[in-house]
Amino acid sequence: MTFLPLSPPGQTPLRVMTIAGSDSGGGAGIQADMRTFALLGIHGLVAVTAVTVQNSLGVKGFHEIPVDVIAGQITEVATDIGVQAAKTGMLASSEIIDTVAETWRSLDTGAPLVVDPVCASMHGDPLLHPSALNSLKDKLFPIATLVTPNLDEVRLLTGIEVVDDDSQRAAARELHALGPQWALVKGGHMRSSAHSPDLLFDGTDFHEFDSPRIDTGHDHGAGDTLAAATASALAHGYPVPDAVAFGKRWVTECLRAAYPLGHGHGPVSALFRLG
Ligand code: PXL
């Protein structure tokens, strides 16, 4: 596949910020995001929202970072280092969501914001208090360039059970009506399909992105990786449909390269990029 342009050695690369949780197993969260950024030639910036205690078998617990520390991380790096795009992942609580939304809004960077509305781990362990769903919808979605829910998140956010093309379109319309410029309904969790059809909607046009379903038991961090790669392409100025197409190709390759880890589920792997 073709990658993103690289800056020459010694020249400051583009910067993309991840506002997300730490995964002690190194497969998802900020660890997946930073790996993606590095292997795409992006300088990653970090605002840690929560520290999870987890391994390949599941999330045992998490500790939320105080909101003033989260706001501080975002503000200090954005005002000094500058940021060409950002993405959110695990935000844990409505207090954190409100802080992230307010901080990002007031910084007024003009940089695109990708909101991956992480609700639970692949094992079903909660990563967001259920009461925070409304904050996601009311505070963060309206300032998002792009939201990227999977089908479980779509059900929680809209009540729509996506089973086919029609319900996927209905979900995209409902999500877009919540205020983001673009809504991507990822089809990867439509396990009965031989494909992984993603649908992007900007309120007028639908764009479809298809890829073969990669048959791997190791897909931990796939959503984070797609959002991080898409944000990286947005930082380069790609139009949203092109950035999503790039993110989808990248995560498909990462799924092909996924590996077993520990006694449970392994992560997708960006290490294929190293040749
Ligand atoms: O893949 C979603 C995700 C995001 N962020 C953190 C996670 C997970 C899944 O486990 O642990 C920190």
Image (spheres, rainbow, N blue to C red):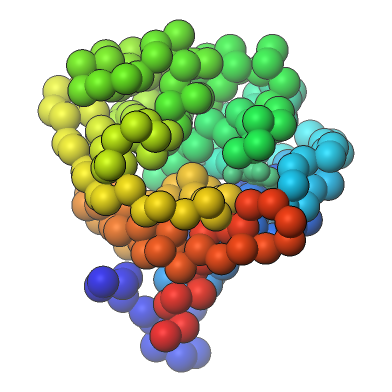
Q: Write down which quadrant ligand 1 falls in.
A: top right
From the top left corner, tell me how far across and down residue 247 is, in percent.
35, 54
Please state if 238 lies on the left or on the right of 178 as rendered.
Answer: left
User: 165 or 70, which is in the foreground?
Assistant: 165
Look at the image and tell me whether residue 199 can be seen.
yes
Seen in the image, is 37 located left or right of residue 63?
A: left
In the rendered image, the vertical position of residue 122 relative to residue 6, given as above or below: above
Q: Quadrant of the C terminus?
A: bottom left
Going 68% across and 16% down the picture, which residue do you hit?
130
Residue 244 coordinates in the image, percent (x, y): 30, 48
Which residue is at 69% across, 52% downward?
Answer: 264
Horizontal side of residue 100 vs 63, given as left or right = left
**Quadrant position of residue 205:** top left
Residue 6 placed where, x, y %?
Answer: 36, 79
Residue 118 falls in which quadrant of the image?
A: top right
The vertical placement of 138 against 228, above or below, is above
How many callouts does the rendering have? 0
Work out which residue is located at the far left of the displayed protein and give it. 205
Q: Is residue 99 visible?
A: no
Establish if 101 lies above or below 122: above
Q: Residue sitting at 56 percent across and 41 percent down?
A: 88
Q: Image quadrant of residue 94? A: top right
For the N terminus, give its image quadrant.
bottom left
